[in-house]
Image (cartoon, helix red, strand yellow):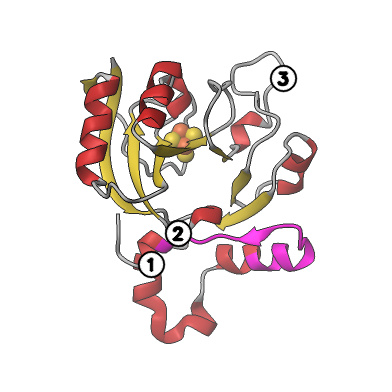
Amino acid sequence: MYKVNEIFFTLQGEGAHSGIPAVFVRFSGCNLRCPWCDTEFTEYTEMGAEQIVSQMLEMYDLPNERRKMCVLTGGEPSLQVDTPLIDALHAAGFYICIETNGTRSLPDGIDWITCSPKESSLKQSQTTSNNIKLQKVNEVKVVFTGTYDPEVWRTQLEAEHWLLQPLRFTGEWLIENVDSWEDDRNDNLNDTVRYILSHPFWRLSVQIHKIAGLR
Ligand code: SF4
């Protein structure tokens, strides 16, 4: 059984797949404790793989779609995602994306890996559980906190896409400040943009689902 916090259908709001419809499966629990984490992942319902897939298909019931996308997220989905679930999702026609903090190895067969490494993984020795275990992923998405240089991840990970995300740039903030956008945009966004201008290997990623008022 898997501990599932929620299953919902919306647009992917972050990263290289921004704007694409996807069924999100949020798994309960995380092995890290990031101070700014705003993800609600503690509650859960226990579900089997078939039950999860059938609920996902109810939400994304478009039989002619060649590529039904799903995003396995958390919490930390690698605590629970395993081969039987991957096989069940593929059998149902899903293209499987996962959003992981990179501290645990993944089962084979996942189609798209987004690694979002966290600052706590920097401070650990090679032997601790917080350290990055993944090597090659599709995209790396880093929250720009301004407390360390994100370039450090380029020495540890291989990826096609490198995305930097401001810490506090949300839809609520944009709506409240839209009239004075040029003068007032928050320092963290300014710092993120400045960083990318001087490190053009990275690309700006904002949470478009929050700007669009989606979940
Ligand atoms: S890794 Fe993600 S889900 Fe886990 S505590 Fe950090 S921000 Fe929250």
What's the magenta region?
Answer: 193-208
Q: Which mark is residue 54?
A: none
Q: Can you tell me whether the CB of the residue at mark 2 lies under 8 Å from the nearest atom of ligand 1?
A: no
Q: CA distance from mark 1 to mark 3?
A: 38 Å
User: In the rendered image, which quarter contains the N terminus?
Assistant: top left
Is disc 2 in contact with disc 1, using a CB cutoff of under 8 Å?
yes
Residue at the (26%, 28%) spot, across then down? 52
Q: Seen from this angle, which residue lies furthest bottom?
A: 179
Q: Secondary structure at mark 1?
A: helix
Q: Nearer the viewer, mark 1 or mark 3?
A: 1
Residue 176, given in percent of the width and then of the height, sits at 34, 75
Of residue 160 and residue 191, the one placed in the foreground of this image is: 160
Q: Secondary structure at mark 2?
A: loop
Residue at the (46%, 44%) spot, across then down? 36
Q: Is residue 93 above or below residue 214?
A: above
Q: Is residue 200 above or below residue 73?
A: below
Amino acid type assigned to the residue bearing label 2 in the image: Gln
Amino acid type assigned to the residue bearing label 1 in the image: Ile
Q: CA distance from mark 2 to mark 1?
A: 7 Å
Badge 3, how many Cα within 10 Å: few under 14, some, many 20+? few
Is tag 1's residue or tag 3's residue first in the polypeptide sequence?
A: 3
Q: Which residue is mark 2?
A: 207
Q: Which residue is mark 1?
A: 211
Horizontal side of residue 73 vs 102, given as left or right: left
